[in-house]
Image (cartoon, grey):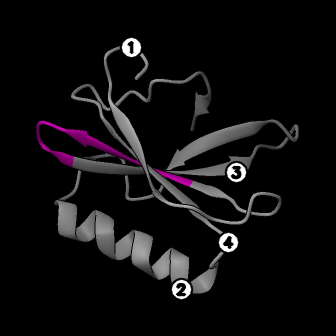
Amino acid sequence: MLENKPGVVVRKGDADAGGILVKLYGRAGCVVLSQFRDMEGTLAWMRATGPEPVPEQVADGYIDKQVRFDPDLWVLEFDAADYVPPFAGKIA
């Protein structure tokens, strides 16, 4: 647990090739973050489900679709009332 934001690995992906999706639980719903590389090649995160929180069913639907497309994905979940992940990283 980091910054008092408990988390759990919901799905283990490929240890070498798996990307990461992070689901953040907050007061108004969920936000899913997806890892990508920015123009400089630096790892960053984008709000894959949009700028505003979405219902949990929408977040889960997005994750399920991505896992079907890429079975190597890891999925992590955190309680984060402020929708800020408990790790450093640029969010675009």
Residue 43 horizontal/vertical position (percent): 75, 39
- As shown in the figure, which amino acid type bears the numbered disc 4? Asp
In the rendered image, the vertical position of residue 87 relative to residue 65, given as above or below: above
Mark 2 residue type = Arg
Residue at image mark 1? 3
Specify the label residue 36 is tagged with. 3
**Is label 3 in contact with label 1 (beta carbons under 8 Å)?**
no
The type of residue carrying mark 3 is Phe
Graded by Cα atoms within 10 Å as few (under 14), some (14 to 19) or many (20 or more), the crowding at tag 3 reads some
Residues in magenta?
Answer: 21-29
CA separation, marks 1 and 4? 28 Å
Q: What is the C-alpha distance between the residues marked 2 and 4?
A: 9 Å
Tag 2 and tag 3, C-beta contact below 8 Å: no
Q: Is residue 11 above or below residue 27?
A: below
Q: Circle 4 sits in a helix, a strand or a loop, which is it?
A: loop
Splitting the image into 4 quarters, where does residue 45 fall? top right
At horizontal 21% and vertical 28% (from top left) the residue drawn is: 81
Mark 2 vs mark 3, CA separation in Å? 18 Å
Please give the residue where the numbered disc 4 appears in the rendered image: 72
